[in-house]
Amino acid sequence: MNVAVIGLGLIGGSLLRALAAHGHDVTGYDISPDTREVAAGAGTGTGTGTGTGTGAWQVADSIAAAADGADVVVLAVPLPALPPVLRELDGFPGLITDVTSVKVPVRDLLDNRRYVGGHPMAGKAESSFRASDPHLFDGCAWVLCLEPETPLEDWVRLAGLCTALGARVVPATAAEHDEAVARISHIPHLLAAALTNLIDGHPLAGALAAGSFRDGTRVAATRAELIAAMCGGNAPAVRGILPDVLADLEAYAGRLAEPDPVEALTPLLRRPGELRRGWPAAAVVPVEVECDREALLALGRAGGWVTAIGPKLSGMRPESDLNGS
Amino acid sequence: MNVAVIGLGLIGGSLLRALAAHGHDVTGYDISPDTREVAAGAGTGTGTGTGTGTGAWQVADSIAAAADGADVVVLAVPLPALPPVLRELDGFPGLITDVTSVKVPVRDLLDNRRYVGGHPMAGKAESSFRASDPHLFDGCAWVLCLEPETPLEDWVRLAGLCTALGARVVPATAAEHDEAVARISHIPHLLAAALTNLIDGHPLAGALAAGSFRDGTRVAATRAELIAAMCGGNAPAVRGILPDVLADLEAYAGRLAEPDPVEALTPLLRRPGELRRGWPAAAVVPVEVECDREALLALGRAGGWVTAIGPKLSGMRPESDLNGS
């Protein structure tokens, strides 16, 4: 397949490497001339791009040049950079996908384009092309969005591309995705920030802090701008779920005010203990899924994913329904 | 020194091993005959207890027998087990210390005894004698409480015992300790529980969850009874601090409701980012401390600790005052 990757940070750069290693004809572009130079030098195939599976790639000097002749364009730029990039792609006839961590706003931007939203749940502490890694997607969950307007054949083609890179392809609507990542990524960053603030002005607490504080606050070290961009870009979903967290914490505070706080608090902690000990699902079973929008979405809602593309799609799903599937 | 350790779980068992390895004459006791048998078998010195530094220890059949002739009794039983153990120690003339994770309630129980409260901040996933380890205290923070009524020479003697085991001895009042551990241990457990609940009934979220969820929820897998005992045993401190967490989360929610949520949220995330990147303190400097209650408490409040006992006490403290010392 002929693929253009726009934006060569950690995800875009890793995708360039992974797709080239799998024999695709890949062209990258980045707005930074320095990044283009580094990426071109690493590609050992500048200007050739033979698509012979040698692991080489091209780096183009413009978005239009990168997209010229591409079957698929992958947008691997931050959310605020999408509108100008999309203007450069006016009239592009192929399929567009993206790797942005929020999906409803991107879907709105891509209205009336041939588009399948995507989000590989992969990351690293470093975020530049220099940190890119062709194996970044091995075993990672990669959401591909299925909306009423999504052409199923385009979804399946992308799913084939992603599963070939080792990813677990999770079907979901953009709205379902945004709500899920608010739960498991955006709100964890906000809780980590609030927890970290508890050592502010309390050096004794900082000196005593160990495992539970270290783990609970780790992601608070992320740059403020990045956390704000993630949470702010998904503000409606985050705001919709934060009250649940507040309600739990208020319930704990209420139980701690009872005459026997230990006995009062214990029952509220059983369910989260069960859930956490059951996560990630230890037992998953193989399933076959009809190539059908509702069947695929049902698989995603049950915590499952697609592993390979064929006449039917192969997938996996958790065996138990501990967490309510 | 002749030391009795009452309660041979992870902490008591590790202390038995560590003290014996350092040449002390150590006798253990546990309410469970099975644990006594295992501990006696591991001690290779049942009934001998020569105190010659061979690493052997004795296991006694009663608290009174264990404490007979001891200079120090270490109570390594859970908080609810303390009152009956203390009744067995009526009339014991030596020094009593404990390892319980909450200090104000224990101080109240030990009123009018010769007592120095202690809390080694050490742990492991497993909690039985079989998991005990003589190196458990290497580098761990070990709070020793200094109150107006604490005999300074007893505090110094215990500090010498603990620093010899490799611990960093942190001077603090019981109230300061309880507030600090609420911040860095008890509230982290409650936040982890509330965060874990966000995947309840949301298998899609569970399937997408990765690093930030994993770390933020790790301690929610702890047994409900243990978390409730920790938090409920320190209920006043936990309840006093939870409103700060709620206020931060409400502030984040408020910023996310503004027209530009990214720009509105960013400034609130800078301080926790700075704090977390600065924790644990990278640079610590050696200090000498007068053997004086207020000087020692000031060291603890500045995030410092005692490392060795001599004519003056040697310690370390963070060089920077990033977190407000």
Image (tube, coloured by chain):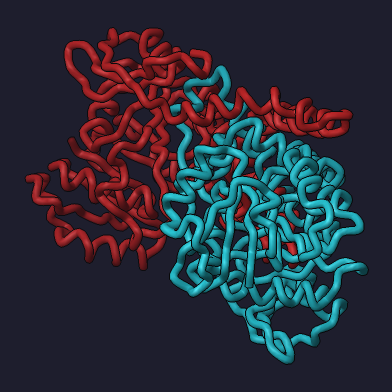
Chain colours: A cyan, B red
Q: What is the x, y in percent for residue A13?
A: 54, 53
Q: Nearer the viewer, residue B20 or B142?
A: B142
Query: Is any atom of residue B290 visible in this view?
Result: yes
Left or right of B225 in this view: B59: left
Q: Give residue A96's quadrant in the image.
A: bottom right
Q: Looking at this view, name the residue that lies furthest to the front.
A: A47
User: Considering depth in this image, is A302 or A30 the residue closer to the camera?
Assistant: A30
Which of the pair B54/B113 is nearer the observer?
B54
Residue A133 spot, x, y in % from top left: 47, 57
Q: Quadrant of the N terminus of chain A?
A: bottom right
- Which one is in front, B183 or B162? B183
**Quadrant of image for the C terminus of chain A:** bottom right
* Left or right side of A117 for A188: left
Q: Position of residue A227 (x, y in %)?
A: 67, 37
Q: Residue at x 28, y 28 (%)?
A: B158
> With respect to residue A23, does A86 lie above or below?
above
Instruction: Give the residue displayed 30% in from the left and 50% down from the top.
Output: B14
Residue occupying image coordinates x 73% and y 53%: A181
Residue A260 visible (yes or no):
no
Q: Can you say whether B286 is above or below B20 in the image? A: above
> Is A228 displayed left or right of B46 in the figure?
right
Q: Quadrant of residue B236?
A: top right
For image coordinates 27% across by 33% down, the residue present is: B162
**Does A288 appear above or below B54?**
below
Q: Position of residue A31 (x, y in %)?
A: 62, 40
